[in-house]
Image (cartoon, grey):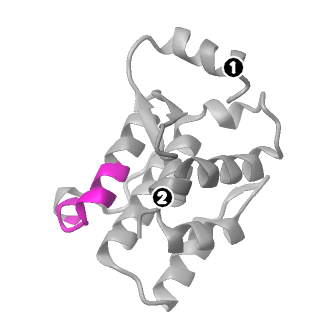
Amino acid sequence: MIEKKRHWERYSALMDKVTGGDAQSARRRDGGYKAALYILAADDDLYRLATEAVDEEGVAFGDIVSRLKKECYSESQLTALLAARGLFSGRDFGVGPMDMVSCEWSMMDVICNGMYLWKGRDVLPAEDGGIEVKVGEREGFARNLEDRGLF
């Protein structure tokens, strides 16, 4: 289930785990990390599994996939996980348009936003506690985030 109210908090917690809390880490600017952690932080079950599989070494997607398959999971969760893994590694993991249209609307929205992040867009916390993807003048926006200590 998508958890909009705590999405930013969860995303930040996962990012802190992979960067060791280093605000200057290159991983904070890496589109693959941003996209994958954004997607994993959105869903209750995916976030729970990710917290056990994310550390300063990276993201152990194999562990998340095997744990998710052992539990009861939805098509949306599996599609989101495979999309996160594909965006993280920059390789195709078999998630196509037909998989995405079988997702719940809220999950498809999360996956699409993850794609924007992968392409180099930046994120800010939205007023409702979720994450809002910001498009536009990238360098100025990134500088603004760094000035405010968000990245």
Q: Which residues are magenta?
A: 99-111
Instruction: Check disc 2 and report its element: helix, strand or loop.
Output: helix
Residue 135, placed above or below residue 127: above
Residue kind at label 2, given as amino acid type: Ala
- In this image, 146 relative to 87: left or right? right
Q: Residue furthest front?
A: 128
The CA distance from mark 1 to mark 2 is 23 Å
Residue 68, placed above or below residue 118: below
Residue 34, placed above or below residue 29: below
Residue tagged 2: 42
Instruction: Check disc 1 and report its element: helix, strand or loop.
Output: helix
Compare marks 1 and 2 and give the one earlier in the sequence.
2
- In this image, 144 relative to 43: left or right? right
Q: Quadrant of the N terminus?
A: bottom left
Residue 105 among magenta residues: yes
- In this image, 87 relative to 11: left or right? left
Residue 79 among magenta residues: no
The answer to which quarter of the image holds residue 112 is top left
Kindly identify which numbered label has been placed on residue 123. none
